[in-house]
Amino acid sequence: MRIGLLTEGGYPYVSGESGLWCDRLVRGLEQHEFDVYALTRSERQEAEGWVPLPPQVDRVRIASLWDAEDDGVVYGRRTRRRFAECYGELAASLCATAPLKASGVAEAAAPRAEATGTHDQFAHEADRFANALYGLAELARDEGGLPRALRSETAVRALERACRAPGAHRAAREARVPDLLTVAARLERALRPLSLDWYEDDGLGAVDLCHAASGGTAALPGLLARHFREVPLLVTEYGVRLRAHYLTEPDASPPVRFLLAAFHGRLAAETYRSAALITPGNTHARRWQERCGAERAKLRTVHPGMDAAPFAEAGESPECADPHTLVWVGRVEPAKDLVSLLHAFAGIRRAEPKARLRIVGGPSGPEGAAYLAHCRNLAAQLFPDEADGPHAVGSNPVSFEETGTPELPSRAEAYASGALVVLSSVVEGFPAGLVEAMLCGRATVSTDVGAVVEAIGGTGLVVPPRNPRALAEACVALLRDPERRARLGAAARARALELFTVEQNIMAFHNIYLDILSRTPARRVVLDDTGEPLPFSVPAEAHVPGRWTDAKVGAVARGGPAWATDTPVRATVPSSETDGSPGSGGPGGSGASEPATGGGRAAVPASVVEVAGAAVPVSAVEGARTVVPVSAVEGAGAASGSVAEEPRATASVSATEGVR
């Protein structure tokens, strides 16, 4: 099948989100064809280039989210009015007093909403947002010029009217001109996929399935392909965009935070409603998706796949680890809470003076660099350089290192150097670094955030976040008990190999692709070399709806009798049933029946025939004919005759075509 892979800020570029996961997926499913539709976030990302693409990637189409393109179309009066109506409806749905659960309302408000009758308002606002979104997309397809219109004064005034309208949320009413300009600019960037030319027969209209590698803006092309071309949509999320908005917008003003949260929530709700299936990467993301309106019947958790090969050597030789060394591996940023880890290590040193801590990882951006400098200063204050004698050079028990050096050439070497791996984060999605430590067979001590508990199960110790004392006590307990440490490490490796490998991830998506296509077959147009539709290129069976993967597939005549859906009527009557049994034609029988030897034709008991020509038994053999004798039909108007004189009593049933 042909898959349209939708990405934002990642694959096929070298840097970005979900790039490694997408590359493993495409390479693992070599029996399928992939068209990659990528949205880029920065000029730097485009300059870094692509990763090597496998042969199953037929083409890559790129659109920019950082550089606005203008097609030069200027709207006339009628088109401006059409745009103002659609954009005004979209803005009004964001400013509604009773937003959806996806807009950040506590879940406890949902039962109260149904009890007070406001549940219909939730559905009304969702439909209002969807109609406005698709209205803007149709306007862009018909007229063009949407990017300029989204940046125009008309858009800002429509947003202002929605914020000042009666019934608008209090946070929206407090929006000032700078807030409106900020929100309008962010909406214009998020809605740029509406203006793309990806939705024709030579684009997403030619794929069998759209697979969005994340939600939010990346899923917009999939929504439009479903709206315009009825292409099914699969959404994979390892982090929900609404949650990311709350984490990455702490300094924005309340009106900006509210309006953007409402947009991400409404878009998520529409994406989940339109998707054929949703595959969260962990239970933590699944709870957020349910909060945003996803139906549980559509959710299937698929854990991300990790390549176990680089960690095999460390996992098979746990005795090589230093029994007194703790290791932390990851990106240095405030969310990792290395300050608490350093304070916890001070307590560990008091209990175990030989303990050492290796912090392995580089900073994440300017904020990460400043945080790394702060952690270095704190480590120097908490642990002054220690020397064995007055003339020896001192050393600090805490070291800050990066992979790629002769001492630590890889992450596997970093995990293998310590007997215990520590995670101290206060915010975490799926802990990929923790799974790598599990593949290395190392015992772990982690904070209870994100999907940590789901990942480690019972193979490690979990403590509350921002609690250095609890973190220190757990680490000391494992440092003093090597047998328990080895037992937990072996269990962690077995769990990781069972649940978090690339192979299980690829197999899961292969089955999901087949499941979606079996329930929602694509109706695509195949083009020839000149770009013209190729007639008779798709067989008629591809347009037959239905779930063909069920164990039981039966054919029932439209408008046929009820007994046709039950156990098929036996065409041959055993000889034992002709001796006095009801309906056998013998003494006490309720009807007549001819013997089963008449020219090889099967005789059917008359009890199954209610009215001549209206009820006929169904043969289980394709193409076979079941003949009902005339004498067996009550009220047929014929006392006797050959079976060839009553063609109305003959029926043939095919396994897929029904009664002829």
Image (spheres, grey):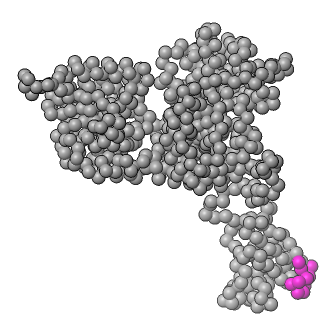
Residue for point 27% across, 47% down: 488
Residue 640 painted magenta: yes
Residue for point 54% across, 43% down: 52
| Residue sticking out furthest to the left | 390
Q: Is residue 392 left or right of residue 561?
A: left
Q: Quadrant of residue 385?
A: top left
Q: In which quarter of the image is the C terminus?
A: bottom right
Q: Is residue 403 visible?
A: yes
Residue for point 52% across, 25% down: 245
Compared to residue 548, the image places residue 263 above or below, namely above
Return the residue nearer the eye: 269 or 515: 515
Predominant secondary structure in magenta?
loop
Q: Is residue 422 left or right of residue 577?
A: left
Return the residue nearer the eye: 2 or 56: 56
Q: Is residue 393 left or right of residue 264?
A: left
First to last magenta residue range:
637-647
Residue for point 23% across, 44% down: 321
Residue 612 painted magenta: no
Return the residue nearer the eye: 202 or 430: 202
Return the residue nearer the eye: 241 or 22: 22
Q: Can residue 118 be seen in this view?
A: no
Residue 260 placed where, x, y %?
59, 22
Residue 77 placed where, x, y %?
85, 17
Q: Quadrant of residue 381?
A: top left
Residue 213 placed where, x, y %?
56, 39
Q: In which quarter of the image is residue 610?
A: bottom right
Q: In this view, does 640 lie to the left or right of 101?
A: right
Residue 72 placed where, x, y %?
77, 22
Compared to residue 212, the image places residue 95 above or below, namely above
